[in-house]
């Protein structure tokens, strides 16, 4: 009996040990210092639109970042660069110009077109507190005065370890990707007031330059709780208006001005952002607003840096 009691006590101690913690399944917590951040939309079009990018070091020591732009379209080109951040300081630049800082040996190339940006912390030590120090945000603005500002989707490191260029978003090493994205969007009314959706895959192999091609399932619920569905496939980056996704997202089919949209990648988990476009005032003025998703559930993904 004593031996059984000792075994039971030992098992209880093992279960309570911090080294015996189970995987943290579920969507990533946001607005916390993190190890990997993703800005799903960077836009730079000469004389039309540009993006102000800001990355922030929340640690009391210098932090080095490895970052990549990934362009949209079928080519899916990647552009890599490194940034060094001073303690508790941000670094900011325009996508169209980039920047060069000889004091910190940081050099960011210009970016043109549209795509996404990923940045990861290169920790000085393996403890998680040296990984989770980063936040980021972007402000997209145009000559027409329309502006979209949003915060990066961020993933925390969950266990101690050295940087390996392989991000196992499995709920054990890093937080998982969200399983589903939930949006409340404005439906299209005669093509005048129409939202856009931007999606990028959570899984990416930038080392071998293998584009990820997710299959996407949309479930649309109108204000009368009537549901519709649509599906698309894209390659590495996708930006479409609601009517380009499906005519079920238009006001004529929905029957209501707003709809709840659930997005799920059937082959790979996704990260996304919506842009609501509407008119306001008299005379009616075109306006835009970023629409961040809420997350449901978690799924495992892998990001590989060169």
Image (tube, rainbow, N blue to C red):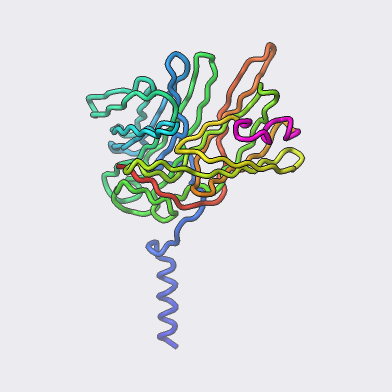
Q: Nearer the viewer, residue 116 or 296?
A: 116
Q: Nearer the viewer, residue 289 or 196?
A: 196
- Residue 34 position, x and y percent, is 40, 42
- Residue 25 position, x and y percent, is 49, 55
Up-down relation of residue 27 to residue 188 (above or below): below
Q: Nearer the viewer, residue 272 or 113?
A: 113
Residue found 52% across the figure and 34% down from its top? 198
Q: In screen coordinates, is 224 left or right of 297?
A: right
Residue found 64% across the figure and 23% down from its top? 278
Residue at the top extreme of this rendering: 283
Residue at the bottom extreme of this rendering: 1
- Residue 271 position, x and y percent, is 50, 40
Q: Quadrant of residue 86?
A: top left
Residue found 64% across the figure and 43% down from its top? 219
Q: Quadrant of the N terminus?
A: bottom left
- State the predominant SS element of the stretch in magenta: helix
Q: Quadrant of the C terminus?
A: top left
Residue found 44% across the figure and 19% down from its top? 45
- Residue 46 position, x and y percent, is 42, 16
Q: Nearer the viewer, residue 130 or 188?
A: 188
Magenta stretch, residue numbers: 242-255
């Amino acid at each position: 009996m004593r031996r059984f009691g000792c075994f039971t006590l030992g098992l209880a101690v093992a279960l309570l040990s911090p080294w015996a913690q189970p995987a943290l399944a579920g969507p990533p917590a946001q607005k916390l210092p993190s190890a990997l951040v993703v800005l799903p939309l960077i836009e730079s079009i000469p004389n039309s639109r540009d993006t102000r990018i800001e990355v922030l070091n929340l640690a009391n020591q210098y932090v080095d970042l490895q970052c990549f732009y990934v362009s949209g379209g079928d080519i899916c080109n990647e552009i890599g660069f490194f940034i060094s951040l001073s303690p508790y300081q941000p670094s900011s630049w325009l996508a169209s110009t980039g920047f060069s800082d000889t004091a910190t040996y940081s050099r960011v190339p210009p970016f043109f077109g549209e795509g996404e940006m990923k940045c990861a912390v290169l920790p000085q030590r393996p403890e998680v507190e040296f990984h989770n120090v980063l936040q980021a945000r972007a402000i997209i603005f145009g000559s027409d005065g329309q502006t979209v500002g949003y915060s990066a989707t961020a993933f925390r490191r969950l266990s101690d370890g050295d940087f390996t260029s392989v991000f196992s978003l499995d709920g054990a090493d890093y937080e998982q990707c969200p399983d589903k994205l939930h949006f409340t969007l404005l439906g299209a009314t005669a093509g005048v007031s129409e939202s856009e959706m931007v999606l990028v895959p959570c899984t990416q192999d930038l080392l071998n330059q293998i584009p990820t091609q997710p299959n996407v399932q949309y479930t649309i619920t109108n204000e009368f709780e009537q549901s519709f569905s649509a599906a698309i496939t894209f390659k590495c980056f996708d930006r479409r208006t609601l009517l380009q996704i499906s005519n079920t997202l238009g006001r004529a089919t929905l029957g209501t001005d707003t709809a709840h949209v659930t997005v799920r990648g059937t082959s790979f988990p996704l990260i996304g952002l919506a842009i609501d476009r509407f008119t306001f005032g008299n005379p009616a003025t075109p306006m835009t607003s970023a629409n961040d998703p809420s997350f449901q559930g978690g799924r495992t993904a892998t990001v590989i840096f060169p």
